[in-house]
Image (tube, grey):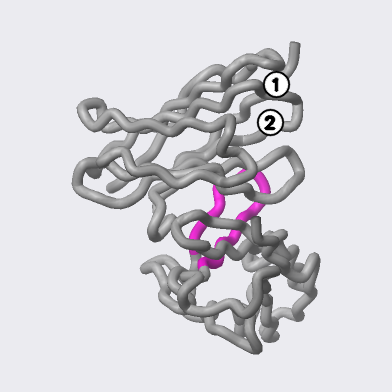
Amino acid sequence: QAVVTQEPSLTVSPGGTVTLTCGSSTGAVTSGHYPYWFQQKPGQAPRTLIYDTSNKHSWTPARFSGSLLGGKAALTLSGAQPEDEAEYYCLLSYSGAYVFGTGTKVTVL
Amino acid sequence: QVQLQESGPGLVKPSETLSLTCTVSGYSISSGYYWGWIRQPPGKGLEWIGSIYHSGSTYYNPSLKSRVTISVDTSKNQFSLKLSSVTAADTAVYYCARDNYFDYWGQGTLVTVSS
């Protein structure tokens, strides 16, 4: 089974920009992995921010964007807000089966 | 509005079978999408368990495949999870969700494996 790797933790200043990445042990992440990005706050269920690499749900704040970057999936947060402090997980599809990333703890400080 | 709700025992003994049901409201499972199960051990990350289509087609996490069965009951608009031979390592919050977009999730239910 593939291992999906994320940065363990990142810190961003209020109003600043941070990019989270999501890599696959099987090689480059492509659009064929249909990358997803989730935000999870303590005690809450995860909430999907991005699906299929860069598509947003109606509830996704405009400051979040998804892309492919250097063989990885990427989530960019531009103009960080205090309420963006959370754990972020990526999810990749491998021919119908999914693997979650290890998660990134984002601190807004 | 689509809503999902997990139900089932909160305590399961080691070596027994964990059984959970997800009841969907606001959308007919028969209309489409895959429906899945995800779990999260206390203080740890998310793990995708598997998913099912209304036709019964399934995908499973290879690391759990030998112990997992996911089934669907379209008449009740429910889908279910069975995980056999559980150990303490299966203690987790179990979520059900609408796969494909992962746009709708249940609130999660904590299942503890303990004697």
- Chain label for disc 1: B
> Residue A87, position in %: x, y?
68, 60
Q: Residue furthest top?
A: B115
Asked if A90 appears above or below B36 in the picture, the reply is below
The residue stretch that appears in magenta: A36-48
Identify the residue at horizontal 34%, vertical 43% (top origin): B57
Give how far across and how far down residue A109 sits, in percent: 79, 73
Residue to which mark 1 is pinned: B113
Residue at 40% in and 60% down: B101
Q: Earlier in the sequence, mark 2 or mark 1?
A: 2
Q: Evaluate if marks 2 and 1 touch, with contact meaning CB atoms under 8 Å apart.
A: yes
Q: Residue A45 magenta-drawn?
A: yes
Q: Residue at x 43, y 55 (%)?
A: B102
Q: Is residue B102 magenta?
A: no
Q: Which residue is mark 2?
A: B90
Pick whichever, A109 or A70, lies toward us: A70
- Quadrant assignment for the N terminus of chain A: bottom right
Using residue B10 as the reference point, say whether residue A60 is left or right of it: left
Helix, strand or loop status at disc 2: helix
